[in-house]
């Protein structure tokens, strides 16, 4: 098994688009003591299926066991494992930060440097967004915190295989 | 053909070849009970839904066909959760139909509503909530397919009332029967990987101290004959786990009997000192391995299982083969022949004489009764064993009586031993025996039960009496929750906490008679044989014998919980030579 030193592994799980499937996947993780770091679900281009992108903390259980147990779920069609280096990952962050007029230019500057967006401006607060790699979003979040977070939400990562990986 | 959903459900069960349903009606499932009147399917009306579930399990154990139970919503459904969990742990093919409140009422806390698909997600192989009448035949087809293929298991189908109620337009449907199932995420493996099978053959031919560790998967795969061929071809000794008793004949010279916490000394120690364990349809359960890091320390592992997730779950195999046990063993025999056959094996006579030495020194044993003493439970079991046909089916509950039954019976045929292994469900014996007898009316069926277990599900003897299902029940009545008592005696300084049950409250003989059975009581050794003989002659109603046994008797050998198997404790009568 590759990259055991990486504590997190990403699984993309193609599931049948049926009621309760997310509960089955989440319930399996809870029942068997596997830790989920993040999880994102959305329909795919084929309406019969949805894709769950789950980042697993493999310190909690051997990845092989996580995959094999997931594969036993009747509604799970296919599981792909992606080491972070083999994946294109993106995550979206939304945040409202404290931003009185005197410090607002510094927020605008930070958002500009990260190529984020200003979504709304209030008298003392600003709402911003950023999409990017999880590491970039981490950095952005850390710097944003200096202004004072009013509310913050991240989506968890979504992933596709890196193209040269596919062509191998 | 226009049908309503209820008719379609019963017709679907007929299409699946169902002959018997164990069940109990109620509000939500009512519409499905009407077409049962016109169906050739036999319905057995139980007295508690748990009984229906365990009967379906016993039926499946004895016949290999899926057991079917049908109950209503809410409490009916929750009452069958224990049998579902039991069947899940022991990989029993079973389909449970539950009624549900109407689709429009789902999620409103309606009368007798319970989220049974949510509740049973973790204890079923799969479950379905059907919301359209037109989906019923397809779902039933899928449910039976999932329950019976791959690693077998229980499947629950939840049916809201509106889609089966002929008075509701939502129940109207055009009948069809699907030719195939379309489950894009379900493809159980059957054939093993040839390279791994070859590797396994090499390991067997090179091994000096091999042991076959046969589990319940042998029985599920109908692989008893294949197992015997493998053992005899390569002269391999076989242990049969609690779930595999009967998968290899106890009277075969290569049989070592049961391993594990209450296994015999030879089976436990042979595994411990083996250089190769050939695990076939077994799962390295904690009751077999004892303390894991002390288990079979010098053994390489061949692990064959139909469930790929079992390979490496507990112990990493040197050759892990996902596949059907029967097919893999057959392929393995071919690979062994191709590699030169058993003639190329090392001489194992030292190993074999070591094992037969253990068998002589440490047999499973007990001290016989002195006159005037209370009955020994082991004596009752030996007498019962010797008074019943070789193919008699034995069902047991959970506890001391279960271990003694497994130890002292001689299982020479597959599918003659029915018990609750993984979940350890007290109260399993009576309903499981009834289910087995329904499935195999040609066989004599005895339940060996404890007094604690019997009190949990005895009401199903009313079912057996009214349906004329002549099962026989031997209660080993020691007036205690015996296994818990044994642990309190050995590990809690004889501080007995909440384990005393009383020998005659209830009066088991009168209780049996009140339920329409023949009741007997046996208190002394000389009464044992006549009572069993009398019971064996009765074939028109159930029989219950209350054997008053000695509560001080403990199950030996024993590997104390949390200890390694090398720390096995044998019966004190054998001295402490066994450590």
Image (tube, coloured by chain):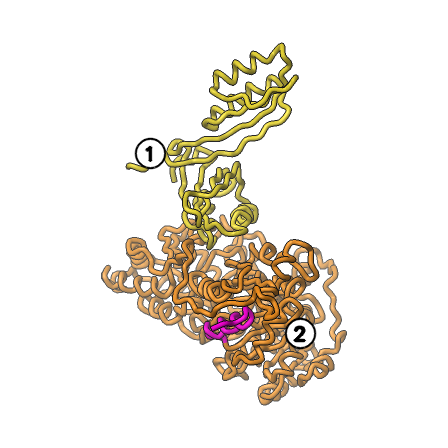
Chain colours: A yellow, B orange
In the image, farthest residue toward the front: B169
In the image, farthest residue toward the top: A102
Give the dominant element type of the magenta stretch: helix, strand or loop: helix
Q: Residue at x 65, y 57 (%)?
A: B105
Image x and y of residue B543, in percent = 63, 83
* Chain label for disc 1: A
Q: CA distance from mark 1 to mark 2?
A: 62 Å
Question: Which residue corresponds to mark 2?
Answer: B47
Discs 1 and 2 lie in a common subunit: no
Q: Residue at x 69, y 71 (%)?
A: B455
Question: Which residue corresponds to mark 1?
Answer: A163
Image x and y of residue B414, in percent = 45, 73
- Name the foreground residue: B164 vs B62: B164
Q: Which image quarter: residue B212?
A: bottom left
Could you say whether the residue bearing mark 2 is in a helix, strand or loop? Answer: loop
Image x and y of residue B463, in percent = 64, 78
Query: Is residue B571 in sight in this rendering?
Result: no
Image x and y of residue A92, in percent = 50, 29
Magenta segment, which residues?
B1-18
């Amino acid at each position: 098994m590759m990259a055991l030193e990486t504590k997190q592994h990403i699984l993309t799980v193609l599931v049948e688009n049926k009621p309760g499937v997310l509960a089955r996947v989440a319930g399996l993780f809870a029942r068997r003591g596997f830790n989920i770091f993040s999880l994102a679900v959305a329909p795919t281009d084929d309406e019969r299926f949805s894709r769950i992108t789950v980042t697993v903390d493999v310190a909690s259980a051997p990845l092989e066991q996580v995959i094999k147990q997931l594969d036993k779920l009747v509604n799970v069609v296919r599981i792909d494992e992606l080491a972070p280096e083999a994946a294109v990952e993106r995550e979206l962050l939304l945040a409202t930060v404290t931003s009185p007029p005197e410090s607002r230019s510094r927020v605008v500057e930070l958002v500009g440097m990260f190529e984020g967006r200003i979504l709304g401006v209030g008298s003392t607060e600003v709402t911003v967004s950023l999409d990017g790699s999880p590491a970039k979003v981490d950095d952005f979040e850390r710097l944003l915190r200096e202004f004072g977070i009013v509310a913050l939400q991240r989506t968890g990562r979504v992933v596709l295989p890196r193209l040269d990986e596919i062509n191998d | 053909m226009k049908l309503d959903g209820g008719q379609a459900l019963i017709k679907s069960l007929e299409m699946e070849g169902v002959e018997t349903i164990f069940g109990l009606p109620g509000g939500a499932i009512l519409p499905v009970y009407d077409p049962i009147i016109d169906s050739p399917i036999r319905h057995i009306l139980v007295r508690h839904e748990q009984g229906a579930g365990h009967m379906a399990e016993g039926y499946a154990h004895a016949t290999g066909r899926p057991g079917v139970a049908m109950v209503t919503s809410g409490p009916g459904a929750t009452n069958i959760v224990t049998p579902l969990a039991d069947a899940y742990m022991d990989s029993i093919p079973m389909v449970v139909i539950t009624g549900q409140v109407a689709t429009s009422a789902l999620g409103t806390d309606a009368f007798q509503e319970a989220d049974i698909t949510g509740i049973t997600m973790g204890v079923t192989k799969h479950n379905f909530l059907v919301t359209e009448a037109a989906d019923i035949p397809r779902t039933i087809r899928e449910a039976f397919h999932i329950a019976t293929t791959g690693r077998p298991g229980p499947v629950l189908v939840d049916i809201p009332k509106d889609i089966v109620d002929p008075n509701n337009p939502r129940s109207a449907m055009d009948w069809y029967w699907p030719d195939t199932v379309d489950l894009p995420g379900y493809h159980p493996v059957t054939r093993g990987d040839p390279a791994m099978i070859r590797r396994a053959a090499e390991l067997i031919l090179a091994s000096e101290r091999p042991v076959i560790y046969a589990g319940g998967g042998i029985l599920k795969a109908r692989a008893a004959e294949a197992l015997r061929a493998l053992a005899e071809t390569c002269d391999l000794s076989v242990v049969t786990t609690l779930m595999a008793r009967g998968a290899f004949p106890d009277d075969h010279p290569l049989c070592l009997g049961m391993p594990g916490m209450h296994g015999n000394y030879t089976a436990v120690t042979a595994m411990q000192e083996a250089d190769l364990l050939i695990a076939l349809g077994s799962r390295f359960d904690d009751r077999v391995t004892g303390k894991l890091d002390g288990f079979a320390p010098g053994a390489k592992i061949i692990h064959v299982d139909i469930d790929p997730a079992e390979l490496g779950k507990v112990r990493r195999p040197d050759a892990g083969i996902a596949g059907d046990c029967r097919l893999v063993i057959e392929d393995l025999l071919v690979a062994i022949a191709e590699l030169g056959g058993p003639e190329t094996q090392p001489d194992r006579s030292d190993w074999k004489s070591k094992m037969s030495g253990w068998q002589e020194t440490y047999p499973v044993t007990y001290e016989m009764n002195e006159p005037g003493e209370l009955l020994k439970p082991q004596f009752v079991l030996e007498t019962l064993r010797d008074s019943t046909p070789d193919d008699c089916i034995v069902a047991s509950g959970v506890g001391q009586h279960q271990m003694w039954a497994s130890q002292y019976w001689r299982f020479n045929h597959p599918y003659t031993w029915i018990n609750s292994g993984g979940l350890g469900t007290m109260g399993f014996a009576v309903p499981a025996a009834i289910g087995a007898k329904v499935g195999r009316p040609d066989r004599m069926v005895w339940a060996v039960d404890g007094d604690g277990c019997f009190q949990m599900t005895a009401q199903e003897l009313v079912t057996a009496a009214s349906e004329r299902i002549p099962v026989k029940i031997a209660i080993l009545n020691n007036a205690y929750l015996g296994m818990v008592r044994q642990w309190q005696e050995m590990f809690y300084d004889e501080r007995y906490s909440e384990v005393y049950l009383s020998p005659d409250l209830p009066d088991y003989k009168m209780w049996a008679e009140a339920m329409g059975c023949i009741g007997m009581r046996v208190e002394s050794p000389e009464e044992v044989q006549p009572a069993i003989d009398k019971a064996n002659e009765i074939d028109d109603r159930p029989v219950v014998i209350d054997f008053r046994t000695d509560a001080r008797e403990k199950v030996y050998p024993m590997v104390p919980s949390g200890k390694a198997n090398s720390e096995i404790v044998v019966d004190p009568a054998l001295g402490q030579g066994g450590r």
